[in-house]
Amino acid sequence: MSQILIRHAPQDQVAARRLRDALEHQGFDVADDSDLDAGVATGERARKGLGDALNAARCVVVLWSNAARGSRAVRLGARVARLAGKLVPVRIDDSALPSDLGEGHPADLSDWHGDIVHPEFRRLTETLDRAVTRRRRRRARTRARAWLFRATIAALLVALGIAGGIGIARYEARGGSGARDTLEAGLGRFFNGQYVEAEAQLRRAADAGNGAAAYYLARMYRDGLGVRRDPPRALEWAEKGAALGNALAQNMVGLLRDARGASVADDKAALAAWLDAAGQGLAWGAFNAGYFLESGRGVGHPDPARAFEYYRRAADDGNAAAGNAIGDLYRAGRGVPQDLNRAVAWYRWAADRGSAAAQLTLGYLYANGQGVTADDARAVELYERAAHQGLPGALNNLGFMYEHGRGVAHDLGEAAILYRRAAELGNKDAEGNLARTLEAIRMRK
């Protein structure tokens, strides 16, 4: 059994995976409760498997969030861990920790995106180190600083693809220990916002042949971090990092090529870069490759069957956008046999992992009884989750539910508010819906 067990709500799977990856790169032996769900049957065997894991773990990290507040399983697991003296709560959004769980100042990772130089992540690892290696406390303290930055690269290289996806890139130390030390110092300054100092050190590391340094320089020029925003310069650095074998740089080459205007040459170069990134196990590289293959960009004609293969590779690494894309393929019967039941299963999987598009589609299926039993209340819940992420279609559909009193109380005023927000975000259907609702409100006066 693992030394550390991460307990979390299903909706927080992405945050749990990110934390697990970072902790494992710090040398901790970690499992999360979704592993238990996947490997143990439901019912008594599932409860026994979780109980055994709780008993065997030296500490239980409970991710506290709005979703966790509504999960009896998470709260029960937290109470059991607290009674056993193993509870380590971690906040991942603005939800306050209940007083019955003790711990007045839990680690706050609500704004954490994987960087282990973040002070709250450091505080968490110190807590876990004390809990897991009490008998080696002195040695662990003296070694902590030495291995902190050695693990930094693997934990920090989090892929920044479309929709904010996550994937760990391959780190290859090139250019000797001096270049590696320069890279690590540059990354420390990058994540502390000291971009001028970071650029100088990252340049030296990149010139010494380190692809990770080139990737972060590309980010600086793409996003205007401490330098003037310069997409062509960003592409130059990304291509240098890609040539050095860095998967994150390869993914960025694809993104920057795609942003240039969809020429045939750029499409081919983007797809080639994403295929390279996918070959290194980068989930967002696989998803982006699947998207181009499905639409026929970079290959001359749509290839949904091959797209499915790449979406599946990304989904196997927890990519929610890929799960939604697989649901779309099954729903339409593109590249795979049409199967609405499988589509629904994939939409649920992706929705639970935060895909707003999947939440919207699944809500529509519940509202219309397609592939599932019609359930307006469930549809409203899913629309609300997607609307909270600012998805215009979800705002429009939620407005429709309020306008017609389906799953919620009839409320033309709320419907008008939602339609207006959707229209402001560019949803054309919402414009007509808003005009109709405002007219209905006027006629009632």
Image (cartoon, rainbow, N blue to C red):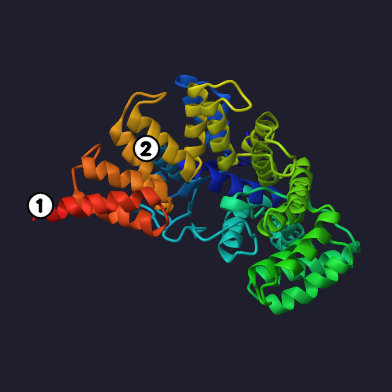
Lateral position of residue 226 relative to residue 37, left or right = right
x then y, percent, for residue 78 = 43, 43
Mark 2, residue position: 72
Q: Sort mark 2 into few (<14), some (14-19) or many (20+) by Cα contacts within 10 Å.
A: few
Q: Is residue 440 something one can see in this rendering?
A: yes
Q: Residues within 10 Å of mark 1 (few under 14, many from 20)?
A: few
Q: Quadrant of residue 298?
A: top right
Q: Residue at x 22, y 40 (%)?
A: 404
Where does the image place residue 235, in percent across and percent down from the top left?
Answer: 76, 63
> Please, what secondary structure does the residue beneath circle 1 have?
helix
27 over 192 or under it: above or below: above
- What residue is at 42 percent from the left and 41 percent from the top? 360
Circles 2, 1 touching at the beta carbon (< 8 Å): no
Give the mark, 2 or 1, whose residue is nearer the N terminus. 2
What amino acid does circle 2 point to? Arg
In the rendered image, which quarter is residue 124 located in? bottom right
